[in-house]
Image (cartoon, rainbow, N blue to C red):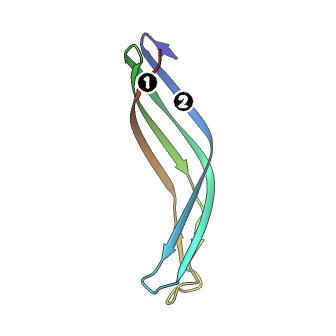
Amino acid sequence: MLWYDVLFYGTGGVGAARYTFSESIKGNEQRLKDTGWVYGGGLEWMVAYGVSLRTEYLRYQLGDNASITGFPGAGAGDFVRFHDIDVVRAGVSVRLAP
């Protein structure tokens, strides 16, 4: 939706995350991946010709549990949960060429 010099928008899709767990014991590391839904929205405001300010909010809904049984001292039922990730971004766009 465009309102004068402000653009409001929404976004949605599939998101992915990759994360690494490590302990102080050298060489003990576990890499995991997760996917889920992502949605959000934002606005962009044209301050002057060729210059705009923007802000955006995204929410990644990741709901899987990661087993950490490979670490010393971890029990069979131990896990780490990454539930959701919230991201807020802001930026400035400047058009350099006419």
Residue drawn 50% across and 73% down? 21
Residue 39, image x, y percentages: 55, 39
Label 1 residue SS = strand
Of the two numbered discs 2 and 1 in the rendering, the one whose residue sits closer to the viewer: 1
Q: Residues at badges 2 and 1 in contact (C-beta under 8 Å)?
A: no
Q: Which three-letter amino acid code belongs to the residue tagged 2?
A: Gly
Residue drawn 38% across and 36% down? 90
Q: Which three-letter amino acid code belongs to the residue tagged 1?
A: Glu
Q: Nearer the viewer, residue 76 or 23?
A: 23
Residue drawn 48% across and 22% down? 8
Residue 54: quadrant of the picture: top left
Label 2 residue SS = strand
Q: Which residue is mark 2?
A: 10
**Disc on the earlier residue, 2 or 1:** 2
Residue drawn 52% across and 85% down? 74
Residue 86, image x, y percentages: 45, 48
The vertical placement of 23 against 36, above or below, is below
Q: Which residue is mark 1?
A: 44
Marks 2/1: CA–CA distance = 12 Å
Left or right: 38 in relation to 58: right
